[in-house]
Amino acid sequence: MSAQSAFHESAGTNLNAQSLRADARRESLRLLALLAPSLFLVFAITIVPIGWLFWLSLFDEAGAFSAANYARFFEQASYIKTFVTTFKVAFIVTGACVLLGYPLAYMLSQLTRRAASICLIFVILPFWTSVLVRTYAWLVILQRKGLINSWLIDLGVISQPLSLANNLSGVVIGMTHILLPFLVLPLYASMKTIDTDCLRAGMNLGAGPAATFRQIFFPLSLPGLASGVVIVFVLCLGFFVTPALMGGGKVIMWAMRMEQTTSLYSNWGAGAALGVVLLVVTLALLGLFQWLLGARATGVWSSR
């Protein structure tokens, strides 16, 4: 090949590469233009309020720039107690939803399409009723002279009414009932996508039903379970109506403390600081959860 031919071939290659890069840039700009309205909406309703919340938390009651709102967390034990209670309730409710929701989602995934559709109606049915109405219904059921205590006393199971409302137990029961569908629905959707041929292959290789479930079905359902757990956990941290009514003033969660700080004491800086701390801790826990889930999934599949 002559030097002139090699030069023309190199020039053509460079020109083609430049054209491809220019096309890629134009395509990126077109995609960015299509995404611009959505990005602006996310920025307006998410980034700006969070930034304003953080900025507001840096001013004390007198309007002076100060970190007093954050120092209050270490100075007052009530803040730490409320913070611990919030995450305690969130972990308990999330665990209860997993224990109740996983078997329910598994049962739904094993039914025929028609039967599963009918059963899913009963899972979605609570969404048609207000959270406030459902909470008051649980108060009627769980109070000292409610349905459960009345039935248990009439049957001779107990002699004195159980304390099921206006305490931590009532909060957990009410929140579990309200948040259970948020775990069942994504988990059921994940289970329905599991290829049954994988389960049959495991059984053909000699695995029993328990081993097939433990080694094949459960690992494949982890993405849906993780999605449901994250949704339930995050919703628990910001729950207000059910803890306020079912707790009877004895269970104070972070959202209730923020409402008291802003509406009762008119201290918006302290309320904003509460929101910022809750947001930061929640994001940290979600990052830790994602890392642990990724490590767990990598360990499961690398061991095969």
Image (spheres, rainbow, N blue to C red):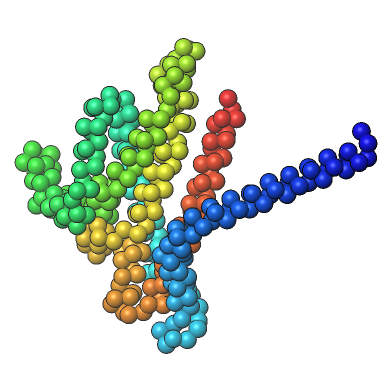
Q: Quick one: quadrant of the C terminus? A: top right
Report the residue at 46% width, 81% height from top. Answer: 59
Quarter of the image for residue 4 reads: top right
Report the residue at 25% width, 60% height from top. Answer: 241
Q: In this image, 102 relative to 147: left or right?
A: right
Question: x, y (%) of residue 13?
Answer: 78, 42
From this viewpoint, which residue is outermost toward the left?
Answer: 154
- State the residue in front, 57 or 256: 57
Quarter of the image for residue 244 reads: bottom left
- State the residue in front, 128 or 286: 128
Report the residue at 42% width, 62% height from top. Answer: 41
Q: Is residue 264 visible?
A: yes
Above or below, 279 against 67 in this view is above
Q: In this image, 124 relative to 261: left or right?
A: left
- State the residue in front, 225 or 45: 45
Question: x, y (%) of residue 16?
Answer: 73, 44
Q: Is residue 161 visible?
A: no
Q: Quick one: quadrant of the N terminus? A: top right
Above or below, 80 against 163 in this view is below
Question: x, y (%) of residue 14?
Answer: 78, 46
**Number of marks in the rendered image:** 0
Report the residue at 29% width, 76% height from top. Answer: 263
Q: In this image, 178 relative to 190: left or right?
A: left
Quarter of the image for residue 191 reads: top left
Question: x, y (%) of residue 225?
Answer: 41, 39
Q: In this image, 86 relative to 137: left or right?
A: right
Above or below, 252 against 176 in this view is below
Above or below, 82 against 165 in this view is below
- State the residue in front, 60 or 246: 60
